[in-house]
Amino acid sequence: MSADPTSTRPEETPVSDQRPPLPPFTPETARQKVRAAEDAWNTRDPERVALAYTPDSRWRNRAEFLTGRGQIAEFLTRKWRRELDYRLVKELWAHDGDRIAVRFAYEWHDDSGQWYRSYGNENWEFDRDGLMAHRHASVNDLPIAEADRRFHWPLGRRPDDHPGLTELGL
């Protein structure tokens, strides 16, 4: 069986490796990509989250530099052992072609019970299959009182009717 001559995909790349929506992104598909990332991170499943990245994906997260799914999964395992009851909201900031910029906030507490809201920005670059090849994240942590929390949904996916960052004034 021969490849479709109009296709830009190599025959050896299985379609199952795609992570739609694919670049180039429109405003709608960029929002879908951001929500899919938020939903995956809210599972707190490092192996599942790592599959959204290319096998050689390169990250900068705060002052830590990672390469590949294995290091990403190890990083996320450490993160979610320390950041308990983690709940995340991401919001599209901008997009162009194969790149998306997001802002985010997440709430969590440490093992002493101190709550935090972590704020940040991420710049993402995707390959043609919709896998993230580069992720650059800047994050700041703000200690908060439990009474100041804004993310109260049950652990897991944020409900569709829960306000986003703009609506919450974050």
Image (cartoon, rainbow, N blue to C red):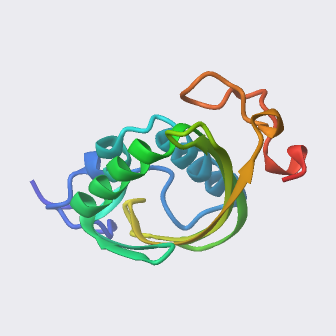
Q: Nearer the viewer, residue 144 or 46?
A: 144
Q: Residue at x 53, y 43 (%)?
A: 110
Along the line of sight, which residue is nearer the eye, 122 or 133? 122
Question: Seen in the image, is 32 located left or right of residue 78?
Answer: right
The reply to whether residue 144 is in sight is yes
Q: Residue furthest top?
A: 154
Whether 36 is drawn above or below 146: the answer is: below
Q: Residue furthest left?
A: 1
Residue 42: x and y, percent?
52, 38
Instruction: Residue 147 in the image: state x and y as whole percent.
Output: 82, 33
Corner quadrant of residue 65: bottom left
Q: Residue at x 57, y 45 (%)?
A: 38
| Number of on-image labels | 0
In this rendering, does residue 89 appear at all? Answer: no
Q: Position of residue 141 (x, y in %)?
A: 65, 60
110 relative to 76 in the view: left or right: right
Which residue occupies 46% across, 49% down?
Answer: 20
117 relative to 45, above or below: below
**Where does the image place residue 13, in percent across and percent down from the top left?**
20, 59
* Residue at 27%, 55% in the rendered image: 74
The residue closer to the viewer here, 26 or 166, is 166
